[in-house]
Amino acid sequence: MNQVPNTPAIVADESILDANISAMAAFAADRNLTLRPHAKTHKIAAIGQKQLAAGSPGLSVATLSEAQYFFDHGMTDLFIPYPVWAPNDDAETLTTLATDGVLAVGTDSVAAVHQLADVTRQHPGVEIMIEVNSGHNRSGVFPDQVVPIAAAIRDRNMVLRGVFTFPGHSNAPGEHTNAAEDEARTLKAAERYLHEAGFGVPVLSGGSSPSVLATVADGATEIRPGVYIFGDATQYELGRIDIDEIALTVVTTVVSRQEAHQDAPARVIVDAGSKILAADRASWATGYGRVLGHLNARITALSEHHGTIIWDSDDLPELGTRLQVIPHHVCVAVNLVDEVYVCDGENIIDTWRVGARGMNS
């Protein structure tokens, strides 16, 4: 990675990324699932276009500003899978995206439905998905609580597209299959309650990267994985991906090397800290990332601009050596940079702007 002009820098291998996109598209097609990838992972128009070219009808996005960014770059079928509380300032954006494209937003309350209807003046093009809680215990109602929300959607002359869930508890060792089963059971229960009350439920949406390959037949009709395009240390340590599926690394330089001495282990210090690797890590993780080619090394500490790596042998890399670090949580890491270098193996072939970086509202 000596072609990268300065470190630290994020590099994505386009051949691996393309293979990951193709593999997930094939998985969805084989199981008759709609693949609506979550673009919050990459925030890059060029990657979103690749995902649509592989067969996805549209994207999932984290915020309305992300939706606007991808809409402006030609991706006009968008879903915000979170409870949206729409202020008056969002009225024009919501109605434009729904008029000139296809827009669905999430909700988990009657009050939010009325707020959205008031702000958009009951714009018939804004479709609504009800979020249900399948075990992650973040947002979302339980299946027996969906009917009043659906009734509010009908009373305000808006469109109910379906129900969705986020099986986030799959981001724990050994939980991907259980989370996928919870997802299917919850979505189908919500569908039954709505059908009994006379509501159609065209879409059952689920599927995050850790659990998506365990999606239960006759459960979700749509999946929304995001991390699968890049991979990260979380998914590797969970056993959800192989090392050759990791497309994104942080290229960093060894700026200090310390041999083992007394009780202090051998370690190297690199110029990648929390401002590019991100300090986000699960409690069960072995560190803040993994080192490509030295998977037994451990990133034990991050300051703002430096990372401490407990090395896996007494043969320490020389000062100035460039290493490739696999971030623990790739979505956060990408949001910390303005651009991503694109490589094909060792050669840098392009640069992609992280166009939706910082679009957090």
Image: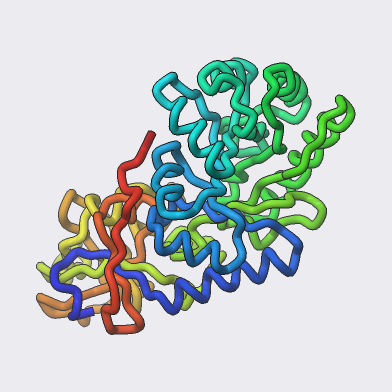
Indicate the position of residue 208 as horizontal and vertical percent values. 58, 52
Classify residue 102 by image quadrant: top right
Q: Is residue 99 visible?
A: yes
In the image, is residue 312 above or below residue 185? below
Classify residue 185 by image quadrant: top right
Indicate the position of residue 19 as horizontal and vertical percent values. 52, 76
Question: In the rendered image, which quarter contains the C terminus?
Answer: top left
Is 49 placed left or right of 184 in the picture? left
Q: How many marks?
A: 0
Is 13 placed left or right of 108 in the picture? left
Q: Is residue 131 visible?
A: no
Indicate the position of residue 179 as horizontal and vertical percent values. 67, 48
Task: Using the image as rendered, state which of residue 174 and residue 166 is in the foreground.
Answer: 166
Instruction: Tell me which residue sits at (78%, 38%) in the image.
Output: 201
Instruction: Tell me which residue sits at (10%, 76%) in the image.
Output: 319
Instruction: Tell me which residue sits at (57%, 57%) in the image.
Output: 210
Indicate the position of residue 53 as horizontal and vertical percent values. 54, 67
In the image, is residue 114 above or below residue 261? above
Q: Residue furthest front?
A: 100
Instruction: Tell me which residue sits at (39%, 47%) in the image.
Output: 69
Classify residue 249 by image quadrant: bottom left
Task: Using the image as rendered, state which of residue 238 and residue 130 is in the foreground.
Answer: 130
State the scheme by which the image is colored. Answer: rainbow
Question: In the rendered image, which quarter contains the N terminus?
Answer: bottom left
Q: Residue furthest right?
A: 196
In the image, is residue 159 above or below residue 15? above
